[in-house]
Image (cartoon, rainbow, N blue to C red):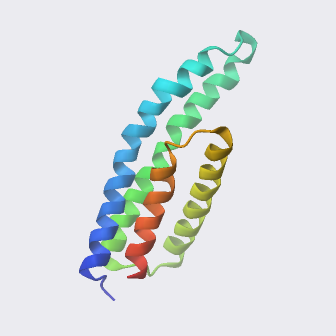
């Protein structure tokens, strides 16, 4: 079954949100995370470098979500693997959001929870 116009609009919006989050996530890394990692003692620098790589690697999740939202806007959510991806991605975003709250960092909550909320609404309508 083809998605409705409202569903399609919401899914394209979620895709846009996810793809633009890459820029914000990268900026947060350079503005906040990477400077903090540089302050770690030299003996711990391999771990700090791995953390920087991991931070940038997270961008792929946002891009995968953007691509899946475009797919779902066109054909709906019908594939078992797509459903599994959505479930795993949503659970990971929920966990990450809670971790940010515990760390006292609130800026990432909108993209973390907003993307899956808008995509979920698009898939339910």
Relative to the observer, which residue lies in front, 68 or 99? 99
Image point (47%, 32%), residue name: 28
| Residue 63 percent location from the top left of the image | 41, 51
Percent coordinates x, y for residue 46 in the rendering: 68, 21
Residue that sits furthest to the left in the current view: 5
Residue 82 at x, y percent in the picture: 49, 71
Image quarter where the N terminus lies is: bottom left
Asked if residue 11 is positioned above or below residue 35 in the image, the reply reads below
Give me the residue at 54% from left, 19% from top.
Answer: 35
26 up-or-down from 91: above or below: above
Question: Is residue 36 rendered to the left or right of residue 72?
Answer: right
Is residue 124 placed above or below 73 in the rendered structure?
below
Q: Residue furthest top?
A: 42
Q: Position of residue 47 (x, y in %)?
A: 69, 25
Q: Quadrant of the C terminus?
A: bottom left
Q: Is residue 74 among the parts visible in the rendering?
A: no
Farthest bottom residue in view:
1
Q: Residue at x 58, y 39 (%)?
A: 105
Q: Is residue 108 left or right of residue 66?
A: right
| Residue at x 65% of width, y 51% of height | 98
Q: Is residue 59 visible?
A: yes
Which corner quadrant of the image does residue 68 belong to? bottom left
């Amino acid at each position: 079954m083809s998605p409705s116009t409202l569903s399609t609009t919401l899914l394209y919006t979620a895709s846009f949100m996810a793809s633009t989050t890459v820029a914000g996530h990268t900026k947060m890394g350079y503005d906040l995370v990477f400077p903090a990692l540089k302050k770690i003692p030299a003996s711990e620098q391999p771990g700090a470098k791995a953390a920087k790589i991991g931070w940038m690697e997270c961008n792929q999740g946002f891009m995968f979500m953007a691509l899946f939202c475009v797919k779902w806007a066109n054909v709906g959510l019908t594939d078992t693997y797509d459903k599994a991806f959505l479930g795993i991605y949503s659970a990971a975003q929920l966990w990450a959001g809670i971790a940010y709250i515990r760390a006292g960092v609130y800026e990432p909550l909108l993209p973390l929870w907003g993307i899956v909320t808008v995509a979920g609404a698009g898939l339910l309508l």
